[in-house]
Image: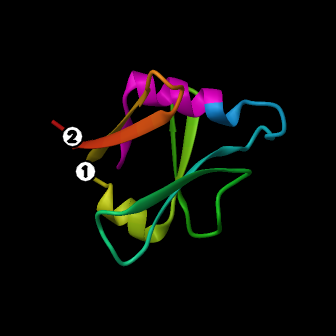
Amino acid sequence: MLTLTENASTIVRDITHQPGFGDGAGLRITSDADPSSFAIAPAEGAAPDDQVVEQAGATVFLDERAAELLDDKVLDAAVDDEGRVEFALAYQG
C-alpha cells in the first residue's frame, strides 16, 4: 500500500484542511493508461472504487489503476521557492 513521508502527510493535510473542504476531504490520485503519469487534485471524498490511505491525519484517495501502480511506493512532497507543491515517488525500502 502507498505510504506517505512526514512531509507529504503535512502538505496533504494543509491542502485538504483549507476552508471550503469538508471533514472527509483528501487528495485524489488517478492514473490513465500511461503508468508514468498521475493526476493529483483535492477531492471532497473517495469515489466508489477508490482505495483510501490515511496516515498522520492525511487522507489520499487512489483510483483502482493508481492503487495498483503505487502499491509499493512512498509519496514525498515539498514546497518550492515559489510556493508550488511538488510530489515525488520512490520505492518503499
Q: Position of residue 89 (x, y in %)?
A: 29, 44
**Magenta run includes residue 5:** yes
User: From the viewer's perspective, is residue 85 above or below residue 31?
Assistant: above
Residue at 31% x, 55% y is 71
Q: Main secondary structure of the magenta part?
A: helix
Q: Determine whether, in the image, residue 49 is placed left or right of residue 3.
A: right
Viewer-proximal residue among 38 and 24: 38
Residue receiving disc 2: 92
Q: Determine whether, in the image, residue 70 is placed left or right of residue 93.
A: right
Q: Which kind of residue does numbered mark 1 sit on?
A: Asp
The circle drawn on residue 46 is none
Q: Residues within 10 Å of mark 1 (few under 14, many from 20)?
A: some
Q: Position of residue 52 (x, y in %)?
A: 54, 51
Residue at 56% x, 34% y is 12
Residue at 40% x, 40% y is 87
As drawn, the residue found furthest toward the front would be: 82
Q: Position of residue 42 (x, y in %)?
A: 64, 48
Residue receiving disc 1: 72
Q: Position of residue 60 (x, y in %)?
A: 54, 46
As drawn, the residue found furthest toward the right would be: 20
In this picture, which residue range is highlighted in magenta?
1-14
Under circle 1, the secondary element is loop
The CA span between labels 1 and 2 is: 6 Å
Under circle 2, the secondary element is loop
User: From the viewer's perspective, is residue 21 above or below residue 36?
Assistant: above
Q: Determine whether, in the image, residue 65 is placed left or right of residue 63.
A: left
**Magenta run includes residue 41:** no
Residue at 64% x, 33% y is 15
Where the C terminus falls, by quadrant? top left
